[in-house]
Image: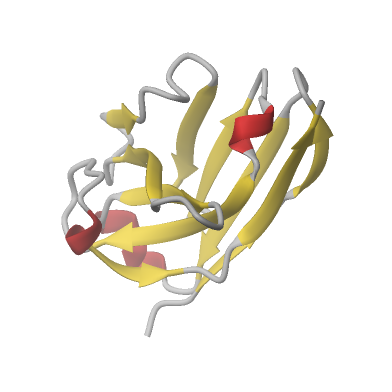
């Protein structure tokens, strides 16, 4: 089974930057889209970004577009989320997920593996 390990979360001041990373246990994950999802207590799960298997296409939630950038390095089986100009509303647990399709998608049912999550807290 594929295991995903997130890292890079922590406390950051509003307006600052943070970079999350997620490494897959199996190199075959390079053939599938990857995504970042966040969850805040009392709120619905929100897909933040997705990137296609070859990194040729990306999709972002409107709330983070222009501020966050998703990227991947398939030689390292790693996907990243660069978070710039963070806001208090970005506070959440961020999860890395692997899809079962190669194209970028934020449809939850397309993802079959999920990480344990990493906490991001933005202070004002």
Give the residue at the far bottom of this rendering: 1
Which of 9/73 is in front?
A: 9
Q: Which residue is found at the position 44% from the left and 24% from the top?
A: 63
Left-right relation of 102 to 36: left
**Where is 42 relative to 25, above or below?**
above
**Location of residue 110 (image quadrant):** bottom left
In the picture, the quarter occupied by the N terminus is: bottom left
Q: Position of residue 76 (x, y in %)?
A: 53, 55
- The number of numbered badges drawn on the structure is 0
**Where is 113 relative to 7, above or below?**
below
Tell me, yes or no, if residue 63 can be seen here: yes
Left-right relation of 76 to 101: right
**Where is 7 relative to 48, above or below?**
below
In the picture, the quarter occupied by the C terminus is: top right
Which of 93/41 is in front?
A: 41
Q: Position of residue 48 (x, y in %)?
A: 42, 39
Q: Position of residue 21 (x, y in %)?
A: 61, 50
Give the residue at the far top of this rendering: 66
Q: Position of residue 29 (x, y in %)?
A: 34, 63
Left-right relation of 18 to 115: right
**Where is 93 relative to 121, above or below?**
below
Q: Which residue is found at the position 70% from the left and 47% from the top?
A: 120
**Location of residue 121 (image quadrant):** top right
Q: Which residue is found at the position 47% from the left and 14% from the top?
A: 66
Tell me, yes or no, if residue 74 can be seen here: no
Applied colour scheme: secondary structure
């Amino acid at each position: 089974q594929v295991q995903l390990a997130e890292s890079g979360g922590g406390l950051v001041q509003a307006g600052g930057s943070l970079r999350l990373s997620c490494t897959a246990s199996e190199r075959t994950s390079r053939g599938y889209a990857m995504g970042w999802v966040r969850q805040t207590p009392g709120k619905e799960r929100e897909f933040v970004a997705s990137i296609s298997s070859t990194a040729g296409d990306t999709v972002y939630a409107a709330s983070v577009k222009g501020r966050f950038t998703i990227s991947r390095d398939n030689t390292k089986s790693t996907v990243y989320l660069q978070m710039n100009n963070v806001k208090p509303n970005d506070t959440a647990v961020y999860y890395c997920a692997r899809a079962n399709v190669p194209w970028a998608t934020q449809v939850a049912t397309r993802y079959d593996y999920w990480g344990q999550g990493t906490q991001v807290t933005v202070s004002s």
